[in-house]
Amino acid sequence: MEPEHVELRRADLYTQVWTVPVQRLAKRFGLSDVGLAKVCRKFNIPVPPVGYWARKQHGYKVEQPPLPPLSQGVREVVVIERRPERPKPSPEVEALVASEPEEQHLIRVPDRVTRRHALVRQTASAFQGAKLDEYGMLICLGQEPRLAMRIGRASLARALWLMDALIKGLDARGFLVGVLEGKERATYVDVFGERVRFYLEETTSRHGHVLTKQEQEARARNQWTLIPKWDYSPTGELRLKIAEYTGGGERKTWADGKRHRLEDLLSNVAAGIVLVAHVLRTERAKRERQAEEWRLAEERRIELERQRQEGEKRQQRLEQEAAQWMKSQHLRAYIDAVERTATAEGFQMSPEKLQQWLGWAREVADRVDPLKALA
């Protein structure tokens, strides 16, 4: 696995920049040419100007400026963070994404809807009678299932219309749309076994707070009251965002703009959801592989530790048995010496008692001797 960052001396990077074109050099570090240029600017490293390599190739005289001194307090070591490699889409994903721009696959918001999707009907019911928060957005306090939306009152009908078209378009592609309830309320779509969460919101504009009549009266009476600095109001501009982190630069936001409204981008949203689901599936498979590798490594570590401990125990048993065997040999040598001495010189002990003692002593030596247990 490649390291997540590269460290090199500033002078070394300067040499490489003037030896290899930035476009090629950037790929070695897992960066774009723009990203590498930013690193060079940060560390005050000059880079070849446009046309430098072409002029050099054709034999023209080119100048290479010296490496200027570094600003005080800046390290001489350059740390380059690698850009995470984006997983290549599978043929299945590429086919789905490629088919989105085709006429028969475009998701359009119809002029009339005979019957709205169940989730849209539930959401419309939940927002009936809803109050507004300080940003002019509808507050729905009920716990009934509903789509994740943060919308002003004037944009509610359009938001429901738009979500109805998107959900039906996703359903037609075989992707199940559902909602998560509780504190983590969200709308999700199930693609390739991955839940991709998304939500619809309306942007707001900010302007200086206009005093209300009550605030003016309170200020006139010199009465302390908390007065906000800003007022917020819905803009009528909608944007749809995918609420999943992937870190690979996948597009996750589509919004009203000067050339397109969000209704014109629903097929792009569907394609974006497919790509994000593919990345999530790839990352999950990678995590599962890593978890399996860690599990196997842990099993190997435990087995090696078991073998080490077992080896230590066997060695301890061997040393104990050797010590016991030496002890039994010492006992037998002493017993034989006692018997020889008693036979040669005689003890103040009757022959019967001597034989009893010798029998008992040899039994003790046998019990100590580990080789007797193997016989």
Image (cartoon, grey):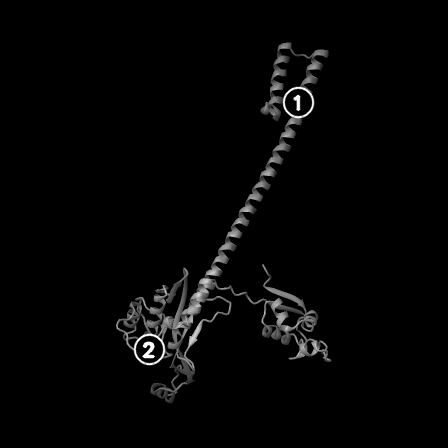
Q: Position of residue 322 (x, y in %)?
A: 65, 30
Quarter occupied by the C terminus: top right
SS under mark 2: helix
Q: Nearer the viewer, residue 190 or 244?
A: 190
Q: Label 1's element? A: helix
The answer to whether residue 28 is seen in the rendering is yes
Residue 370 vertical position relative to residue 123 in the rendered view, above or below: above
Kind of residue indicated by mark 2: Arg
Residue 173 tag number: none
Q: Please name the residue shown 60% across and 73% down the image.
A: 33
Instruction: Give the number of callouts.
Output: 2
Q: Is residue 218 shown above or below 106?
A: below
Q: Which residue is mark 1?
A: 331
User: Residue 158 got which mark?
Assistant: 2
Q: Residue at x 38, y 79 (%)?
A: 135
Observer able to see residue 243: no
Could you say which is closer to the camera, residue 131 or residue 280? 280
- Above or below for 92 versus 344: below
Residue 237 in picture, x, y percent from top left: 39, 80
Residue 165: image x %, image y %?
33, 72
